[in-house]
Amino acid sequence: MTLMRTAALVGNPNAGKSALFNALTGARQKIANYPGVTVERKSGRMALSSGEPIELIDLPGSYSLDAASPDEVVTRQVVLGEFPGEATPEMLVVVIDAANLQQHLVFAQEVIALGRPTVVALNMIDLAERDGLAIDPEALAASLGVPVVSTVAVRKRGLEALIEAMSGAHDQDLSARHEVSALTLPERRLSARNIAKGAILSESPEHRLHTHLDKILLHRWFGPPILFALLFVIFQAVFAWATPFADALDAGIGVLIGLAQSALPEGIIRDFLTEGVLTGVGSVVVFLPQIVILFAFILAMEQSGYMARAAFIMDRMMAAVGLSGRSFIPLLSSFACAIPGIMATRAIADPKDRLTTILIAPMMTCSARLPVYAVIIAAFIPSTTVGPGIGLQGLVLFALYVSGIIGAMLVALVLRRTVTKGGESGFIMELPRYQMPPLRDLAIGLWQRAWVFLRRAGTIIFAATIALWVLLSFPKAEAGESQLDASIAGHVADGLHTVMAPIGFNREISLALIPAMAAREVAVSALATTYAVDSDDEEEEANRLIPRLQAGWTLPTALAFLAWFVFAPQCLSTIAVARRETNGWKWPAFMLAYLFGLAYLFAGITYWSAVALGL
C-alpha cells in the first residue's frame, strides 16, 4: 500500500495559515491532539493539479525552529521528522503575511534553509495593498530561491496558482538556493530587511511614516527616554487635570454629609450614614477622576499601537534581570490590577519566567494604590512647580510608580538567580499598525473601568468600611474617653501598633492596614472612618480626611506610609488567584512574606532617613 504524500503549512502566528488550510482542504479535515501533548493537530486532504491526493498538515504558528513554547516544539519536531509516529513532510508551504513582510521573512529563511521542496504563500496581499504596499512576488522568489504565490486565503484568491506551484515543488533545483543555513538570527534579520526592501516596489507616504516612527520609537537609545517621558506626562496629568473634578466630587460629598446631619437626629443611624457610608466610601470615590485619566492614557497607548512597541523597549531592559518582553504584557496589565496580570502569565511558555512574573506582578502599582497615593500627596506635598509644566505632586507620583518598577526588576534579578533560576528566553511579537484610537472604543473602555471602580466602592470597600465602622463604634466610650480607645478596633490597633510604631506608623495607620488587605484603596476609607468616628466636631467631620492627616501626621510618617504601599502585601483576591495559578499555597505564602518584609523595611528606611534629615 502506497502511503499518501504529506505537506505542511508553516509560518508565524497570525499569518493566515488556518484560513489557507480551510480553503485548500474544505470539509476534508481531521482534528485531534498530538499524542502526549495538548497541542491541536489539524490535517486534511487536498488534490494537486495532477489529481494526486496529498495530506496537508496545519502546524502551530512559530517564530523559530529554536523552540520556545509547546506549540513551537511540536512544529519543530514535525518539520524535522522527530515527532514519534508522525511522517516527515515531503513538502513545506511557508505562509507569510504580506503586510509584515520583513518580520515573516526571518522564519521563512530558516525553513527554506532546510533544503526541502518549499513554496511560499504571500498571504493577505489585499491588506498589504490597502496599507499602500506594492510587492513583486517574482523579485521575492528570486531572492529566496523558491516559488512565491500571492494569495488571499479568506477570499480563496490565488489557490489555483498555489496548487500548481505545490505540484511542481519536487522538481525544484534545491542546489540553486541561496546559502542561508549557516546564518545567525541577527544575520537572517538583516537579510530579511534587504529582501523585503528589494521586493517592495512602492509604498504609500503613510506606510513610510509608520516605518520612520518605528525607527525612532524602537531605537535603542531614543526609545526608552520617549517611553519614560510619556509616562512622566501621564502622571503630571493625573494631578493637574483631575483636580477640578475631584474637588467637585469632594464638595458634593460634603453637601450630602451636611444634608444628612441636618435631616437626621443624632444617633446611630446618622453616624452610620455620615461616618461610615459617606465619609468612608466617599473618600475613595473622589479619586475616580484620577483613575479615569490614567486609564484614558493607557487605552490610548494600546489602541494606537504604541503599547506593543513599549513591550519591545522593555524587553531590552528586562533581559538584564533574566526576563523577556513576554513578561511585559502581564506586568503592564498589573498596573490596572494584579489579578488579570497574574492570569495573563499563562501565555509565558517558560515555567520559571512565568513563576517569576507572578511573584513580581503585585509590585506593579495597581489602580487601587492610586487613591492612597493621591490623598497622601495632596495632604503633604505642596502643589508647586519645579520647572516649566512640571508639578511637584505629579513628580512624586511618577517617582512612586518608578520605584515599584525598579523594585520589581531587582526582585526579579534576585529570584532568577536563586529560587526561579533557569535559562533565558527570547521575545517576538507582532507589531500592530499605528492608528488613531477610535473615540467610541476609548469611551467604552473608560466607562467599563470606571464602572469596575465604582462597583468595588459599592461592594468590597463598602463592606470593609461598614465592618470597620462597627468595630470602631462599639462599645461606646464613656465621658472624656476617646472612642478609638474604647472600641474593639482600638484594642486590635494597640496590638498591631507595637509592631508598626518603629517605622513611624500611628494607631490609625496600623488599624487601616487590616481592612486594606481586602482592597488597597480601603486604607483611605478606613482612615476617613477612623478619624470621623473619633471626632466630636461635626463641622470637622464634613471637612473630612486631608486636614486631619495634616494635623495628626508628620511628614516622615506620611513618606513612610507611601513607601509601605509601594511594596504593600497583596489583597486577598490576588493571593487567591496566585494560589490557583501556582497550584498551591507555597508560592503565594512566599510572595506575601517577601512583600511584607520589603514594605516594612523600606517604610522604616524612609521614616528613619526623613527623621535624620529633620523633615
Image (spheres, rainbow, N blue to C red):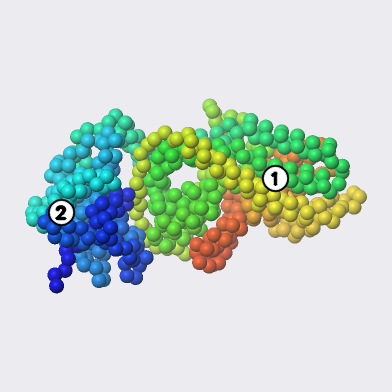
Graded by Cα atoms within 10 Å as few (under 14), some (14 to 19) or many (20 or more), the crowding at tag 2 reads many
Q: Quadrant of residue 49?
A: bottom left
Q: Is residue 261 left or right of residue 523?
A: right
Residue matched to label 2: 166
Identify which residue, 215 or 349, lies in the foreground: 349
Q: Quadrant of the N terminus?
A: bottom left
Tell me the SS state at disc 2.
Answer: helix
Marks 1,2: beta carbons within 8 A: no
| Disc 1 residue type (three-letter) | Val
Tell me the SS state at disc 1.
Answer: helix
Identify which residue, 539 or 547, lies in the foreground: 539
Q: Quadrant of the C terminus?
A: top right
Q: What label sits on residue 508 in the rendered view?
A: none
Q: Residue 539 appears at what percent x and percent y?
A: 81, 36
Disc with the residue nearer the chain's start (1 vs 2): 2
Graded by Cα atoms within 10 Å as few (under 14), some (14 to 19) or many (20 or more), the crowding at tag 1 reads many
Which residue lies at the image location 21% right of the left edge and 67% below the top edge? 87
Q: What label sits on residue 281 in the rendered view?
A: 1
Q: Is residue 165 left or right of residue 460?
A: left
The residue positioned farthest toward the bottom in the image shown: 1
Q: Is residue 414 left or right of residue 392?
A: left
Q: Is residue 479 left or right of residue 244?
A: right
Seen in the picture, residue 555 relative to 86 is either above or below; the reply is: above
Identify which residue, 267 or 167, lies in the foreground: 167
Q: Quadrant of residue 235?
A: top right
| Disc 2 residue type (three-letter) | Met
Q: Residue 214 appears at what percent x and percent y?
A: 34, 37
Q: Residue 567 appears at what percent x and percent y?
A: 58, 52
Seen in the picture, residue 233 relative to 373 is either above or below; the reply is: above
